[in-house]
Amino acid sequence: MAPLDLLLIDIGNTRLKWTTADSDGPIQLAGEIATKKATTAWITALSRKFFRQHLVLSSVVPKLAPAFRRAFAERIVEVNAFLPELGFRFNYPKPAEIGTDRLAAAVAVHAENHFPAIIVACGTATAVTVLDAKGRFSGGVIAPGPQAQLAALLGATAQLPATALHLPRTAMAKSTKDAIRAGVILTFRGGVNEIVRQLLKTLPPRPKPKVILTGGNAEYLASSLDFSHTFRPLLVFEGLRMIGDRIWSQRIE
């Protein structure tokens, strides 16, 4: 059978990202827009542009799902916790509550058979997922990402100025804006370090748990983490491709 031609879409709270991929070629991000701009007309136009592809959709914005279902019809698979093609079991009481982006990332890591593992997804929210020593999805931590922290700080104060977020030059800030940047980024870094440290205590030390970073805000962590890790920016898309390959290879003879 010829390699599958897939359209992979990850809808986050802030950004909608997509790419195309075959079953085994390299994955590169093809495009993204603000999630709020994903109108019914835009979704319909996307389905016409990619009329040959089979869509694998991960979304944490439920209201967009009906438009994608109408536009792609029989060509769509929506990620959810009950797909057998995820390939892993749950040590988690309510799997339906889990964000589909976390599920897709877990698929990619689980396929490597290195357990336990901790996945740190740095987006609008910082979602930390644990695969236990048996490879089961076992839970984790959800915390605000740096942009959410910044928005909360500015929204709760009267005099702090609007501030663009970027890496601070030093913790000893000499302006209010630099003080805000330092506070948000250092809080983010310290929070991730402490979350992973606490989660490591719940896991057996051997084999050594694998830690994987992904997501756009991982750049703010840089070399500031206290633990060894790998950075895989397109981890969710890796998982979406695996899901699509497992499902559509069975359906297309």
Image: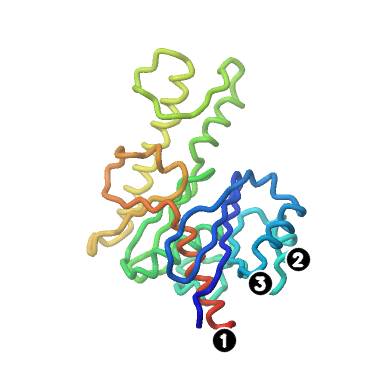
Tag 1–tag 2 contact (CB < 8 Å): no
The three-letter amino acid code for the residue at tag 3 is Arg
Q: Which mark is residue 70?
A: 2
Asked if the residue at tag 3 contacts the one at tag 2, i.e. Cβ–Cβ closer than 8 Å, the answer is no
Q: What residue would you read off at disc 3?
A: 75
- Which residue is pictured at 45% across the width and 29% down the height? 166
| Residue for point 56% across, 60% down | 100
Cα gap from disc 1 to disc 3, whole angstroms: 15 Å
- SS at mark 1? loop
Measured along the vertical axis of the image, is residue 87 above or below residue 103? below
Query: Which class describes the residues within 10 Å of circle 3: few (<14), some (14-19), or many (20+)?
Result: some
Q: Position of residue 167 (x, y in %)?
A: 40, 29
On screen, residue 159 versus residue 116, left or right, reads right
Q: Residue at x 57, y 86 (%)?
A: 253
x, y percent for residue 221: 37, 39
Instruction: State the CA–CA distance, disc 2 to disc 3.
Output: 10 Å
How many numbered marks are there?
3
Earlier along the polypeptide chain: callout 1 or callout 3?
3
Which mark sits nearer the N-terminus, 2 or 3?
Answer: 2
Q: Given the image, on which type of amino acid does mark 1 rest?
A: Glu
Question: Which residue is label 1 attached to?
Answer: 253
Q: Can residue 98 be seen?
A: no
> Secondary structure under badge 2?
helix
Q: How is the image coloured?
A: rainbow
